[in-house]
Image: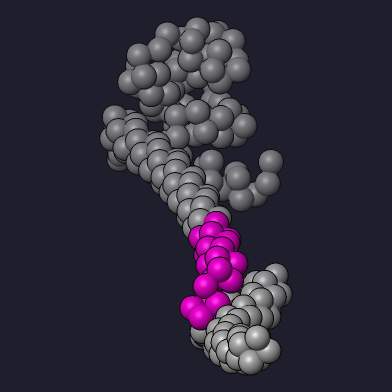
Amino acid sequence: MTKDETAKALPLEAESRLSKEVLGTRLKQLREFHCQTQCAFADKIGVRRQTLASWEQGVCVPSIPHILKLRDLYKISMEDFLNPSIPVEAVCTRARKTTELERRKIEWEEQKRNEQERLLKVRETLINEQEHLIKEQETQMKNFVMFAHILIAAVLLFSTTYPLVGLPLCIAYFILKKRLGIQNRILDVIDILCLIFNCYGIYWILDELFFHFGYGEVKKIASYFNSSLLYDAF
């Protein structure tokens, strides 16, 4: 037992300490305030009933370890308990209030901890939902970009059937792809091929038009001369 514990257990000076009889009476009042029998009270302290009875009768006094045990069990202030001017009921009532405040403090801290844990769980749930939404948006954007690329490729391929329209479309793709942020090598290859086909188609159309026009005139002239020669021969 250290000196500090002894001083806390028996804080009063030697000349002002309780007599055996008064201390025994206060121990009895403490037991009766908690509505305990001598057997139950003695069991809590860790002594025999006869020892407790001798304390209450003022035959002997409890040792310092037993006094410290009383303080810890009933949460009472030994300074107040050993002060004869303070009633035992007031000491016990104050101890109950202190215990109640400590209990409420513990409950409040536990409630606060539970609330913090709940908020953390809600925060984790919100973060997970946000990440899930971001992934869904990224997936939708990828699908949209893929659909847009497929649509552009289909338009470019279809434009080869109308070279006069397809050629401006192929040129417009190269002009606008940087502004639209299109970076796809496959589309570039498709556009180049479509551009070649469209150029060839336009060339074929122009060549076909001019060729048929010239060939028709030459054929008419040749048929005229042939007919004249045959007429002269006869």
Residue ID at (60%, 15%)? 47
On screen, residue 123 versus residue 218, left or right, reads: left
Decide which of 204, 138 is in the foreground and name it.
204
Residue ID at (60%, 91%)? 228
Query: How many numbered markers are drawn?
Result: 0
The secondary structure that most of the magenta stretch takes on is helix
- In this rendering, the answer to whether 34 lies above or below 193 is above
Q: Quick check: is 77 in the magenta stretch? A: no
Q: Position of residue 28 (x, y in %)?
A: 39, 19
Report the colour scheme.
one colour
Q: Position of residue 52 (x, y in %)?
A: 52, 15
- In this rendering, the answer to whether 138 lies above or below 122 is below
On screen, residue 129 versus residue 47, left or right, reads: left
Decide which of 102, 125 is in the foreground and name it.
125
Q: Position of residue 104 (x, y in %)?
A: 36, 39
Q: Is residue 149 visible?
A: no
Residue ID at (35%, 14%)? 35
Q: Position of residue 201 (x, y in %)?
A: 62, 78
- In this rendering, the answer to whether 55 lies above or below 85 is above
Say which quarter of the image contains residue 103: top left
Q: Quick check: is 147 in the magenta stretch? A: yes
Residue ID at (51%, 84%)? 168
Span highlighted in magenta in the image: 141-167
- In this rendering, the answer to whether 53 lies above or below 64 is above
Quadrant in which the N terminus appears: top right
Q: Is residue 229 visible?
A: yes
Decide which of 130, 84 is in the foreground and name it.
130
Quadrant in which the C terminus appears: bottom right
